Amino acid sequence: MQHKNPKKVRRTEVVTGLMIILVAFSFITSLLLDFNFVSPYATFQEDLAYLSEHIHNQRISSYSWLATALITLVAIPFYLVIFHKRLKTLHYLNGLFLLGASAGFMLMGKVGLELHQTMLQILGEGIEQANEQMNLNLLDQFRQEQNYRLMGSSCFGLFAIGLSMTKFRLSKFPLFSTGLLLVSGPALIYFNWYDPDHLLWTAAMAGIIIGVVVFCVRLINKGL
């Protein structure tokens, strides 16, 4: 029977911890760069004017979400490897949640770039000359972008819940992370669909990020 080299296992744990921390911070970066041009307090023409003045910010936001999707996708195999011998099925379920988050953010970024192209076309013809069909296309793309955001962030919330369940299989999993993830994951999903602008949505996201980072620091320093 072959045994894994402890040094190799530790290297894998360190790299995995760093990769998941990178996922968390790329998510934070994308949220900070996120661009929303539709306001309930403005007319659609005013929304278009605002978008036209910040068109480059909208493109940067789309690329940022695509980068987050790619980093998340790359981190999945590392996550699966470190839990392969320790968990039976939970890590595969969490891997699927990470895959769903990656897919949501990737589609969000893709639609965001399509929205960018539509807006460039509108600017080329002049905002005042934009016909109703172009305006409807722009709104439809924005709604798609928001739906993919909900999909991606909800999967991230499900991953947080699944990760917290690891405590019941591995006693070394940080108790502090377990508590934060177990509370913040469901809260994020709830506010995602019922009130994404609520302050508690931000608090839930912060709780998940802190819980994930604490777990990763524990993984890097002491392993599982």
Image (cartoon, rainbow, N blue to C red):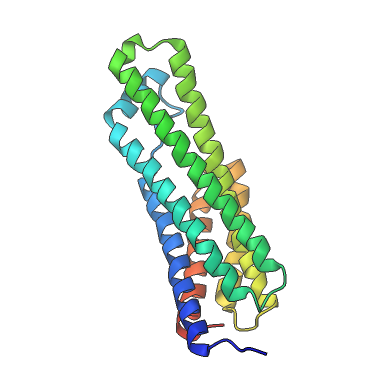
Residue 13 point in image, percent of width and height = 50, 78
Query: What residue sits 66% from the left and 78% below the top?
Result: 86
Q: In the image, 23: left or right of 4?
A: left
Comparing 211 with 13, the one in front is 13
Q: What residue is rendered at 69% in x and 67% in y?
A: 90
Residue 88's place in the image compared with 96, above or below, is below
Q: Nearer the viewer, residue 109 or 127?
A: 109
Figure quadrant of the N terminus: bottom right
User: Which image quadrant for residue 117?
Assistant: top left
Quick one: which residue is furthest to the front in this view? Answer: 1
In the figure, residue 88 lies in which quadrant?
A: bottom right
Q: Is residue 131 above or below residue 46?
A: above
Quarter the C terminus occupies: bottom right
Instruction: Please give left or right for residue 83 compared with residue 125 in the image.
Output: right
| Residue 58 coordinates in the image, percent (x, y) | 35, 36
Q: Residue at x 31, y 13 (%)?
A: 125
* Residue 160 can be seen, yes or no: yes
Residue lying at 53% horizontally and 57% vertically, measured from the top left: 204
Count of numbered circles in the view: 0
x and y, in percent, of residue 6 in the image:
52, 89
Q: Residue furthest right?
A: 88
Residue 207 appears in the picture as rendered: no
